[in-house]
Amino acid sequence: DAGITQSPRHKVTETGTPVTLRCHQTENHRYMYWYRQDPGHGLRLIHYSYGVKDTDKGEVSDGYSVSRSKTEDFLLTLESATSSQTSVYFCATTAAITDTQYFGPGTRLTVL
Amino acid sequence: DQQVKQNSPSLSVQEGRISILNCDYTNSMFDYFLWYKKYPAEGPTFLISISSIKDKNEDGRFTVFLNKSAKHLSLHIVPSQPGDSAVYFCAASAAGTYKYIFGTGTRLKVLA
């Protein structure tokens, strides 16, 4: 929809290791988001960005950090992965002139 | 504190009949509402939206109704098709925040 790609698409890692997920968009949308999807919880906002180097926390930000050095890229880092961070992670973007949010294909992360 | 609720985790409907998916919200600041459809192993895709200045919005087989006094919105799909089988999320946002709160989703199954 908004030229959003996520990498990797699947990852298995071990508890305590750092993990970085990448989101890339081609539409020059100002706003970018990271969500996690878990059964019974729907989509929960982890962090979001309203511009280059401008980020803020969402409702489930503990254990996660983000960075946005370019408009098109938004990185999500798990400093020390835990089993509770096993989830499907979605990146999303919104253009400033609309209120519609578009999602990437997701990254399935398993922390053993 | 769930600000957006989808109280029906699942719904089954016969092909050709109407599907009605419901969503309730608690925050009176929300003034923009969206519905997303999600297939397994894919990201959510935008379906239809409605602003609080309207009480109805139609797009083909999909109609969203908004009852502001009841803080309730519903998505009607008529006629339902087997390809509509998916998880549907409603989301709400307050003007200018560009932050979206999602419900937990309703799994729709359209029976052929």
Image: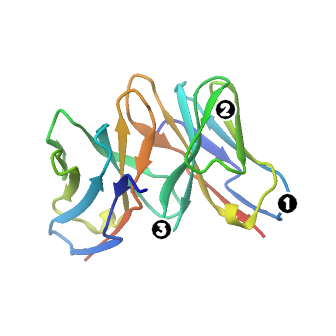
Which mark, by number, is residue A40? 3
Identify which amino acid the numbered label 3 is placed on. Answer: Gly
Disc 1 sits on a residue from what chain? A
Task: Give the Cα distance between marks 3 and 1.
Answer: 26 Å
Q: Quadrant of the C terminus of chain B?
A: bottom left
Q: Nearer the viewer, residue B108 or A35?
A: A35
SS for callout 2: strand
Image-based side of A45 in relation to A107, left or right: left
**Label 3 vs 1, first from the N-terminus:** 1
Q: Residue at x 55, y 24 (%)?
A: A28
- Callout 3: chain: A
Tell whether label 2 touches label 3 (CB within 8 Å): no
* Amino acid on which disc 1 is placed: Gly
In the image, taking residue B40 as reference, residue A34 lies left or right, namely: right
Q: Position of residue B52 (x, y in %)?
A: 21, 36
Image location of residue B4, percent across then percent down: 36, 53
Q: Residue A51: horizontal and vertical position, in percent?
A: 59, 23
CA distance separating discs 2 and 1 = 25 Å
Q: Amino acid at mark 2?
A: Asp
B110 over A11 or under it: above or below = below
Let me know if residue B49 appears in the view. Answer: yes
The residue where tag 1 is placed is A16
Counting labels gives: 3
Can you tell which mark lies on residue A73? 2
